[in-house]
Image (cartoon, helix red, strand yellow):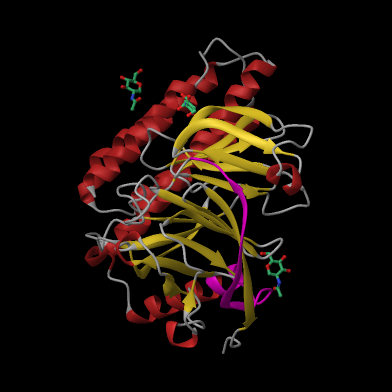
Amino acid sequence: MMVALRGACLLVLFISAFLPPPQHAQDPAMVHYIYQRFQVLEQGLEKCTQTTRAYIQDFQEFSKNISIMLGRCQTHTSEYKSAVNNLALRVERAQREIDYLEYLREADICIESEEKTLAERVLQAAEEEKKIRTLLNASCDNMLMSIKSLKIVKKTMDPDGSWMKDARGNSAKVYLLIGSRNNTVWEFANLRAFMEDSTKPGPRKLILPLSWQGSGQVIYKSFLFFHNQGTSNEIIKYNLQKKMVEDRMLLPGGAGRAPIYQHSLSTYIDLAVDEHGLWAIHSGPGIQGHLVLTKIDPDTLGVEHSWETPCRNQDAEASFLLCGVLYVVYSFGGQGPHRITCVYDPLGTVREEHLPNLFFPRRPRSHSMIHYNPRDKQLYAWNEGNQIIYKLQTKKRLPLE
Ligand SMILES: *[C@@H]1O[C@H](CO)[C@@H](O)[C@H](O)[C@H]1NC(C)=O
Ligand SMILES: *[C@@H]1O[C@H](CO)[C@@H](O)[C@H](O)[C@H]1NC(C)=O
Ligand SMILES: *[C@@H]1O[C@H](CO)[C@@H](O)[C@H](O)[C@H]1NC(C)=O
């Protein structure tokens, strides 16, 4: 807890590195904004107990320092504006960290000092429930019935990698990311060009400024989201059109501490897209070996909600989300049969007992990735160097009470 808080304070202090030198220009509205954001941050920290008092003081002093520094600035340049924008982004990120600490604190040592009444807690739980229902609304009510067929669309030599289409929008492009860590993305005009190497034009080669780790990448609205190699929990949002890093976030909740799936050891953070948007599947802070599911806002990169699932990492090889439900694929000893034996529905309407036997067509080895695409409602998978499409059969699930 203390280490985490110190981390947050250091993070906040780190923001100072992005401040422009004081002789540069200044924008009073922006300063006001920054000051307000810091006040919110301070209020968040203020709530915590005496154990963190020293850090809060540090932080308050820093906040004061910033306003003094900005106050000294005079002129108005565009160069400065972008620096301030950058700072504002960093501040937002810091706030997300603080929010996460608040969440930890609630679950941890500070709880006794809060002395919340039972009624308040019940109210809070009800609000939380309401928030989740809004997040995962009734716009989508399918559940998986069976994996209907398998189609091998391409063969490469590499045991690890991922391939995908944009999970939103209507681009026909297909992307190929070979290996468990690299910075080269191959872009094919469409599925046919992907399948037939001889088709012209050939694939376009995109070199990312950073490398990915594992095979959890997804593409959502022309942004490639990936786990930044060499970091434990940084997610990069890369703009495929402008060819630049658009934003980045630190996934909280103990993400990246351990490989998520026992049979896919290079993946520490798996990303997923379903009808509800962007998700991350990762390791957690508490119960060892259980998967944690986190919903991420793809525009702001804020964490919308996080759930500890009962699904274990042992014998797992991949997972995907369909209509707000997590399906985890297992195979004993890393060989077939591959079967979904754990599902997790944050709303609780789909449970294991509702599911038929969800077996995959027989494959000799475990999958490097299996991702659902809500546009064509198929699974894109990588198995022993083969790029595979699994067609699915779904049915309506029980309505929410
Ligand atoms: C704030 O500024 C004072 C004086 O410039 C400096 O001594 C102090 O270390 C600064 N504090 C923080 C937290 O940045
Ligand atoms: C459900 O949420 C989506 C956005 O996540 C929204 O576009 C849609 O209108 C909502 N549908 C209902 C039935 O509330
Ligand atoms: C990416 O993969 C290629 C082919 O295996 C390899 O030559 C290259 O060094 C890799 N690049 C990085 C940054 O890992």
Quadrant of the drawing holding the C terminus: bottom right
The residue under the point 69% across, 18% down is 78
At x 32%, y 72%, the residue is: 116
Residue placed most toward the observer, 170 or 37: 170
Check the image and report above or below for 176 versus 367.
above
Task: Evaluate whether residue 277 shows in this view.
Answer: no
Q: How many marks?
A: 0
Q: Residue at x 30, y 57 (%)?
A: 105
Question: Which of the two residues, 82 or 191, is positioned nearer the viewer here?
Answer: 191
Residue ranking furthest to the top: 23
x%, y% of residue 238?
60, 36
153 magenta-colored: yes
Give the image location of residue 347, x and y in percent.
Answer: 51, 77
Between 386 and 279, the one lying in front of the other is 386
Residue 231 locus on image (x, y percent): 38, 35
Instruction: Confirm whether residue 252 shows in the render.
Output: yes
Q: Residue 142 falls in which quadrant of the image?
A: bottom right
Residue 83 part of the magenta-drawn span: no
Tell me if 33 is positioned left or right of 124 in this view.
right
In the image, residue 165 above or below residue 229: below
Residue 201 place in picture, x, y as percent = 78, 32
Q: Give, as a single range, the part of the protein colored magenta.
A: 132-157
Taking 118 as reference, is 115 above or below it? above
Position of residue 354 in the picture relative to residue 135 (left or right): left
**Which residue appears at 38% of the width and 51% of the height?**
264
